[in-house]
Amino acid sequence: MRVQTSLVSIFSAVAAAAFVVAGWNGGLAGPTLSPLIADNRPNAIPVDTELVLAVDVSYSMDPEEQALQREGYIAGLTSREFIQALKGGMHGKVAVTYFEWAGPGDQRIVMPWRLIDGPEAADAAANAIQRAPYRRAMYTSIASALQFAKPLFDASGYHGLRRVIDVSGDGTNNSGPLLVPVRDDVLAAGITINGLPIMLKRPLPSSLDIENLDIYYEDCVIGGPGAFVVPIRERAQFKDAVRTKLVLEIAGRTPEQRVIPVQARAPRISCTIGEEMRRQRWGN
């Protein structure tokens, strides 16, 4: 049964951030994922986690949000907490790739797979992300981003005990394939999906945004062992929340807190709400 819980101050060095957890397993998400999607070649380098950072660059993300998003990942990858979590793994190293996405067919790899095994490698990865020019594009297709991310594990050059896709964005799926079948296909391959819904602005009547984007991510986007959501509601929270999220993903941990069962199996928000709003407002 999927469960949810809230956390405050997971690490003393990190500011308070709200978390929602699915697939809780007592606090440790070990190497339990199926190797259905993995680089199983003999020369694949063993790592603790293969992490795909999938970053929204649709037009609903204003330039300030884009900058905060990227700076959050850069700060998280180079943080002391991240390096400590890295060193605590079985192999003491992880593999990370970073790509930007918007509508169907609009996904671009900003940083190809990189091995991170200490501060120098983390700095090099952060610099590669920082150097990339900013861009924005039409539409929001979380489903297409997940479709793009899934095969990246096949020929990564690494073999991780865990495989995770970290999706950040400020809107619902409103174009491309339906989200739930794509999400379920990714989960069936043994990949965990975590979410970073960005909720810094109140939705405008003319937009396709919704109030409860965190609930949408909980019910329609994330999944897999230990999957969780970190909603970001304040600009000042951004860097600390991203850092904490990366630490949890690399450490393979889920929060050890009171478990609250989901009220019902049915989503609390329609998983096609983005498509429905688009049809109502634009007629397509």
Image: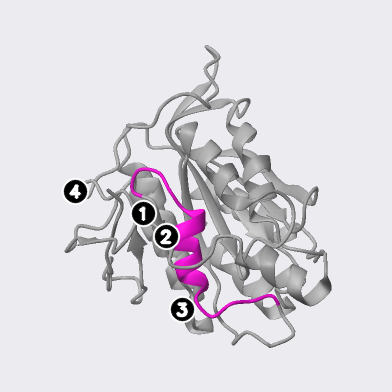
Residue under pointer 2 = 245
Determine which quarter of the picture holds residue 168: bottom right
Q: Nearer the viewer, residue 117 or 36?
A: 36
Check contact, mark 2 vs mark 1: CB within 8 A.
Answer: yes
Above or below 218: residue 282? below
Q: Of the two numbered discs 1 and 3 on the same chain, state the one appearing first in sequence.
A: 3
Residue 274 is situated, as x and y percent measured from the top left of the image, at 65, 66
Q: Of the two numbered discs 4 and 1 on the same chain, state the one appearing first in sequence.
A: 4
Residue 177 is situated, as x and y percent measured from the top left of the image, at 70, 48
Check contact, mark 4 vs mark 3: CB within 8 A.
Answer: no
Residue under pointer 3 = 237
Is 204 situated left or right of 93 in this image?
right
Q: Nearer the viewer, residue 269 or 85?
A: 269
Q: Secondary structure at mark 4?
A: loop
- Whether residue 231 is in magenta: the answer is no
Provide the residue span drawn in magenta. Answer: 208-226
Identity of the residue furthest to the top in this view: 42
Residue 97 appears in the figure: yes
Residue under pointer 1 = 248
What type is the residue that disc 3 sits on?
Gln
